[in-house]
Image: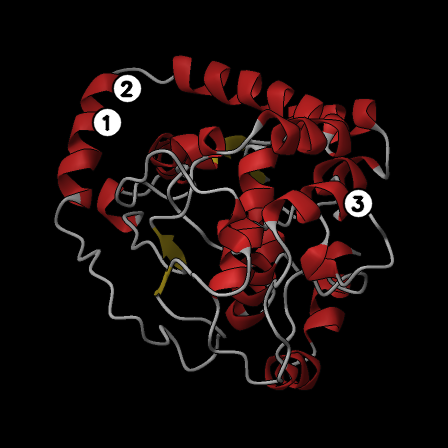
Amino acid sequence: MVTIIREPIDKALAKFYFQASRDDYKTGVAGFIETVEHYSKTCQNPKLDRNRQCFNEYTEILGQGRVAVAQEKLATLDVIGTTETFDDFMIALSIRLGWPLDWVTYKRLKTVLDRPKVSDHSEVVLNNFKANMADDITVYAYGVQLAQAQIAAIPNMLALRQQFEMLQAKVDQSCEFKAHSDHFVGKDCYKMTTKGNHGAEPPQQIAGPQAPGGTQQGGAGGSAAVGLGLMQLQNIPRWCVETASTYSVVPGKSWGSLIDTKVRRDWSHRGCDDAFAAASA
C-alpha cells in the first residue's frame, strides 16, 4: 500500500485559494468570499460545506479519530511520501514497483499561480490552523520521519534524483487555463483571484509556481488515504481511482471536494462505491 501526505496548514491554505480562485463551477456553487482570517477561525465547523472545512483528515480517515492509530497505519505502508518531496516519492514508488523512472514523470495540474506561501500569512492565521489541525500536524510529522527513512534506505538516491530531474525537465508544464480532461472538473491552472476580500492580508513576497505541493502551488489540497493495496486498486476502474484521488473522495463516506453533479452521477453510474467495497472485502 502507498500514500502521499501534505503539510496540513499548506494543504488547508491550498484548498482556500483554489476554491477562491475557481471560475469554472458548473453548479452555481461559488468559491470562498470570506477572508483567509475568517476561514482559519471557522474551518473546523462541521456544519460548513466540506469544501470550507479544514478537518483532520489523516487522523479521521486513517485513525478513526485517533492519532496513535493513524500513525500505526502509516507505519504499515510500503511507500509513503510527502507532497513537499514529491519527486522522492515518485522515485521510491518506481523502485518499489520495478518501473523505469520515465514512467512516473508528471505534469502539475490545478495549480493556483502566485498564491501566497504559508509564511506570507500572519501569526494569528497560522496559530488558528495549528490549533484546529493539531492532530493532523502530529500525524504528518510522523509520516515525514517514515518517508525520510525509506528514502535513506535507497542506494544511489542522489544519482536517481539527478536522473529524475532531467526527465522532469522534458515535461511540458505550461498553463493554458483550460480543462485538462473531459472527465474531471478543473482547469490545468488558475490565476490568483482578486475578487472579494481575500486580499485583506496581502503576501509580502510572491514567486512563481514550484513543484507540486510546494508553497506556491494550489490544487484542491486533498489527499485521500484509501487503505488499499496495489493489487486491489488494479481491480477498480481507473476512472474511479483517479476521481477518488483528485477529489479526496472517501468511497461510501465522503464526497471530499467533489461538487460537480455530472461527475457524481458518473461515479454512481460506473459503480465506483461498489467497486471500492468489493476490493476492500
Q: Residues within 10 Å of mark 3 (few under 14, many from 20)?
A: some
Q: Position of residue 42 (x, y in %)?
A: 77, 47
Quarter of the figure that contains the C terminus: bottom right
Which residue does the image show at 43% across and 36% down from the upper left?
Answer: 117
In the rendered image, residue 55, in percent from the top left (x then y), is placed at: 75, 44
Q: Check disc 3 and give the amino acid type.
A: Gln
- Mark 3 to mark 2 CA distance (whole Å): 40 Å
Q: Considering only order in the chain, which callout, 2 or 3, is on the residue closer to the N terminus?
A: 3
Quadrant location of residue 276? Answer: bottom right
Residue at 16% x, 32% y: name it. Answer: 163
Asked whether the residues under the numbered discs 1 and 2 touch, taking CB atoms below 8 Å apart as contact, a structural biologist would say: yes
Label 3 with label 2: CB-CB less than 8 Å = no
Q: Amino acid at mark 2?
A: Met
Q: Residues within 10 Å of mark 1 (few under 14, many from 20)?
A: some
Instruction: Give the answer, above or below, for where 132 lies relative to 235.
Output: above
Visible residue check, residue 43: yes
Residue 157 badge: 2
Residue named by callout 3: 44
- Residue 37, quarter of picture: top right
Dot 3 lies on which element? Answer: loop
Q: Is residue 28 left or right of residue 205?
A: right
Q: Quadrant of the N terminus?
A: top right
For the residue carrying disc 2, how many other residues have a C-alpha within 10 Å: few (<14), some (14-19), or many (20+)? some
- Circles 3, 1 touching at the beta carbon (< 8 Å): no
C-alpha separation, residue under disc 1 versus residue under disc 2? 6 Å
Give the percent coordinates (x, y) of residue 85.
Answer: 40, 30
**Mark 1 — residue?**
161
**Label 1 is placed on what type of residue?**
Arg
